[in-house]
Amino acid sequence: MAFATLELRQAEVNRDGRRLLGPIDLTLDSGGITVILGHNGAGKSLFVKMCHGLFAPDKGTVLWNGRPAVATRQERGFLFQTTPLLRRSVRANIEFPLLALGSPRAERRKKVEAALQQARLDTHANAPAASLSGGERQRLALARAAIASPSVILMDEPSASLDPASTKELETAVRDIAAASTKVLLVTHDIHQAKRLADDVLMFAEGALLAHESADSFFTRPHEGAIADFLEGRL
Amino acid sequence: METLRAAWGLVAGFDPALYAIIGLSLRVSLSAVFFSLLIGAPLGAALAIWDFPGKRVLVVVSNALMALPPVVVGLGVYLLLSRAGPLGQFGLLFTPKAMIIAQTVLILPIILALTRAAILPLKREYGELMAALDVSPLLKLRTLLWDARIGVTTALLAGFGRAIAEVGAVIIVGGNINGVTRVMTTTIALETSKGNLELALALGVVLISIAIAVNAVIYALGQIGQRYQEGV
């Protein structure tokens, strides 16, 4: 199975003359779940937003299958830390990416019904999305990100504001998505979540990519410096 | 008391002359609201969504025009439509069409500015999602206008309230011709000056009722909007 290939070449983000991220050279071409780890302010969110194409790097390139990330956003899904909701029903929120893609009405209806059931939101389908609880909102966000069957879904700390039960539900859903051949890039600063989910790990500190390796290797081999501090919980 | 009873008799007895005046008032003001919606809502949305050169000037001007005195609008439209004016050839002066044009000019800035104000917070709220989904400009405009529909409807009702209650513009371009261009406000002014208080009072009651109904609808829409915004 060929997965979408992400290639960063000397990608950098600078603001007000200060380098916030990079330069990063990286190739990701495997499936599964890539967990992006690091402390707050390490550049994880910036990295994942740049990889989705929410902005272009100030220097270098970010390409998916050889094409700029900025020009191919509709081919991927994106999950925000705080779910932006349209002031519409749950159903209309989940349907929206299909509207953006210009999908026909019959196809939209079919896919949305299936997504509502899978996300266990069918009983709330016509309720205002704003009336959902935190966990339900994140299930809506996941259903919305996956509705157009993207080859990749990027997630920016999706469980940051969830309780343990909702986090467990979300992690199960993330595993299901990855098992269905969708590549997942997930940002977290929770090392336990990373151990539960990761097939491979990207470790960031102060805007630099410190490591890219398989989860087995990353969590078992000895480390030094910032990675050792992070893994051992030193502040 | 006798006058009030007589006024109520006109309203409750469905006096044809009274209801003809009410009908014309509604036709003129609702038409003005319709045309202002067609022009003002997309323009207000565009001002909220996109940046372009001269945008700030446009925003300041449109906000300033909200406070236009009706008599000034009436004078401007009169000059445009009078025989010597650039649109004089169409013979619109002293017709309901001239009144519709004047009221459209009067309420267009209100609908434009309030539509912009309704869309601005939504634009911020939806910004990241729209960017993540790479939504086309047209879908963005449609989505923001539709999701701000309660605010836009409130803008329309505010425009309608201003149009139905104004007297200065319609009396200048309409002329207050009996059975042709006489509307509620101009009739009240005329009949009061003639001492015919029954008809003036009856129309006053109708105007107040319309004002209460419009405000009740605005309130109800606000409640619905809160449910979709805050989920309560």
Image (spheres, rainbow, N blue to C red):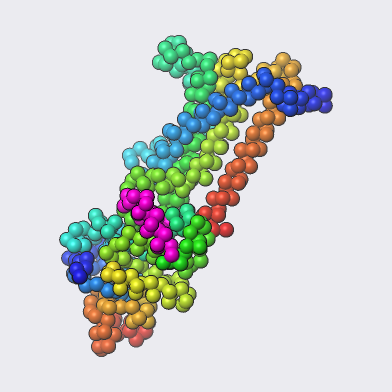
Extent of the magenta region: A93-117
Q: Pick the quarter of the image with the N terminus of chain A.
A: bottom left
Identify the residue at image location x=26%, y=84%. Answer: A216
From this view, report whether residue B56 is shown above or below residue A14.
Answer: above
From this view, report whether residue A191 is shown above or below residue B219.
Answer: below
- Main SS, magenta region, reads helix
Identify the residue at image location x=50%, y=56%. Answer: A126
Q: Nearer the viewer, residue A145 or A8?
A: A145
Is residue B225 visible from the viewing direction of this image? Answer: yes
Q: Residue B171: image x %, image y %?
A: 58, 19
Residue A219 quadrant: bottom left
B160 vs A116, left or right, is right
Q: Residue B41: image x %, image y %?
A: 44, 38
The extreme right residue here reads B1
Is residue B65 visible from the viewing direction of this image? Answer: no
From this view, report whether residue A1 is shown above or below residue B67.
Answer: below
Decide whether residue A172 is among the magenta residues: no
Residue A80 quadrant: bottom left
Q: Nearer the viewer, residue B115 or A40?
A: B115
